[in-house]
Amino acid sequence: MALAARLERFLTRKGIPYSDLAIDQVTSLDAAVIASGKPQADFIQATLLIDIHGVIMAVHRFDSALDLDAVIQVTGRRLQPLTARQSIRLFGDCDPGCTPPIGAAYELPVLVDEDVTRAERVFFSGGTDHGLVEMEGRSLRLALAGSRQGHLVIRGQGNGDREALTLEEVADKLQKLYRLPPMPALGLRILRLTANTEATARELAELIEFDPSLTAQIMRYARSALFNYPGQINSVQEAVTRVLGFDRVAHIALGIASVRAFNVPRNGMLGMDRFWRHSLYSAFLCQNIAPRCGADKGLAYLCGLLHNFGLLLVGHLFPAEFEELNTLRESNPEASMHSLEQQVFGHGNGDEILAVGHGAIGGILHRLWQLPDPVVKAAGVHQRLGYHGEHESYVLMVQLANALLKGRGIGDEFNPDDIPSLLEGLGLSQTVVDDLELEIDRVAPDLDALATSLSS
C-alpha cells in the first residue's frame, strides 16, 4: 500500500480523487523527491508546530522554508517545530520522515501558504517510505478545506536548522574570524571631541573642514528646507551656531564619516541608496519623538541614524551572501529580515554566526567603536519586538520610527508592527502618529535629496 491507512480512509470517505505513485524505499521527503524524478516545484510538504495550546500543521511548497515570524503573526501563537519523536507519536501509521500534508486526516488544524492554494497539480508524501500522492489542485483544495490561509514562507531553499549562539560568542567569533573595520580616523576624532564637555563649535567646524566632502554635506544639510533658515550660511561654524547646533552637526558628521568604513553596493533594497534614506528618515523621526517622551534629542537622532549599521557590516564582510540577502528581500516582502538572515547565514563555515541578525551584529560593532550605550542597545535589539530593558525608550523610538516608515516603503522590514503597543511603551497617544506623519510629508523631498547626495 502506497498510502498511510488514515490518509487513504480520509480521501476515500471525502471522495477526493488522487493517484498514488510507487517509488523506491526512502528515508525522507528530500530523498522521495529525488527518487520520483518529478520537479521540486510541484511538491508540497508539512511542517508540524506546537505550543501550549497544541499542534498545528503548516503546509507549504517543498522549495520554500517556513517563516516562523510570519506564522506567529498569522496565529498570534509562539509556535515551535515538533521534535521527530513527537511527530512519530502523532503519525503512528506513517513511516518516519514521511508526514502527509493533509492535517484533516489526523484531526489537526492546518495553516496553508497562499502559494499552495494556487497550485494546479502537486505531489506529496503518502505517509509511507515507498509511495507518493499525485493530486490536482482542485482536489487538494477540497482536502485542505477549512484550513487557514496566509503568506507563511520564505521563497527559495533554506539552510536547515542551526544552533543559537550568545551575543558574547558572536562578538568573540567576529573579532577572531574577521577583520572588522575600525572606525575611520575622522569619525574617531569627532567622537572624542563630542565626549569633551568643553568642546566648542569652532573646534568642531575646524575638524569637519579638514574634509571637503564632509564640509559640503554639512553645508547642504544646513541650507536645506528642513530648517528654513532665512539668512546666508557661509561656513560650517555658522551652520553649527546658527542652524543645526553642536550635537546635530557632530552626529550627522559622525554618521557620514563612519559609513566610509564599509564597501557596500549602492543598488537594491539593502544597498547604500536605500540605507541612507532609511537612516535619515529614522533619525528625523526619533529626534521628533524624543521630546515627547523625555528622551535626549541628540542621542535619539544618533540611534535612528546608526541603528542599521549591522547591514553595512554584513555587506562589507560577505558581499556574495549580502547579494543573496538582497535578492531574498526583493522576492519576500512579507518575511521578516530576521528570518531571511537565518536563511542566508548558516552554511557551517563560520558565517552562521551572522544568523543572529544584522541588529545584533551592528550593536556589537557599535560597542567595539565605543559609541554611547543607548546607540549600542538601539542597534542591537531593534529587531526584537516587545523589548524591555536598558535604554528601552531609545529602542522603542527606533522601532516606532521604522513602523511608521513601512507604510512609505522605507526600510528593510515590511511586515506590520504593533504601533499601539509601541506608543503605549513610550507613553504617547495615537494623535502623535498623525503629527509625525505630517512632519514626514513636510520634509520628505529634502530628506530624499540629502540621502541621494550622501550615497553618491
Image (cartoon, rainbow, N blue to C red):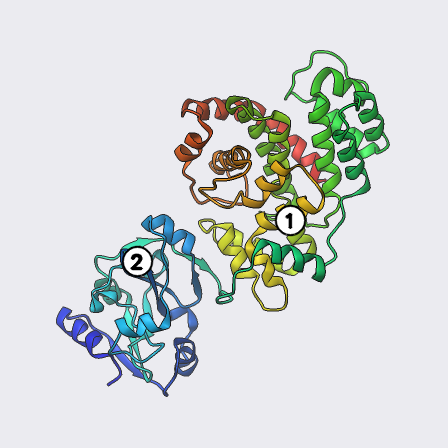
Q: Is disc 2 surrounded by few (<14), some (14 to 19) or many (20+) residues within 10 Å?
A: many
Image mark for residue 364: 1
Q: Is disc 1 surrounded by few (<14), some (14 to 19) or many (20+) residues within 10 Å?
A: many
Is any part of residue 123 visible from this angle? no
For residue 195, what is the image quadrant? top right
Q: Whole-percent x and y of residue 71? A: 37, 54
Image mark for residue 290: none
Say which element carries label 2: strand
Q: Is residue 350 left or right of residue 124?
A: right
* Rendered view: 159 above or below 449: below
The residue type indicated by label 1 comes to: Ile
Q: Nearer the viewer, residue 243 or 444?
A: 243
x 32%, y 65%: residue: 120
Q: Whole-percent x and y of residue 320? A: 65, 60
* Rendered view: 350 above or below 260: below
Q: Nearer the viewer, residue 260 or 204?
A: 204
Is any part of residue 434 visible from this angle? yes
Q: Is residue 153 left or right of residue 225?
A: left
Image mark for residue 111: 2
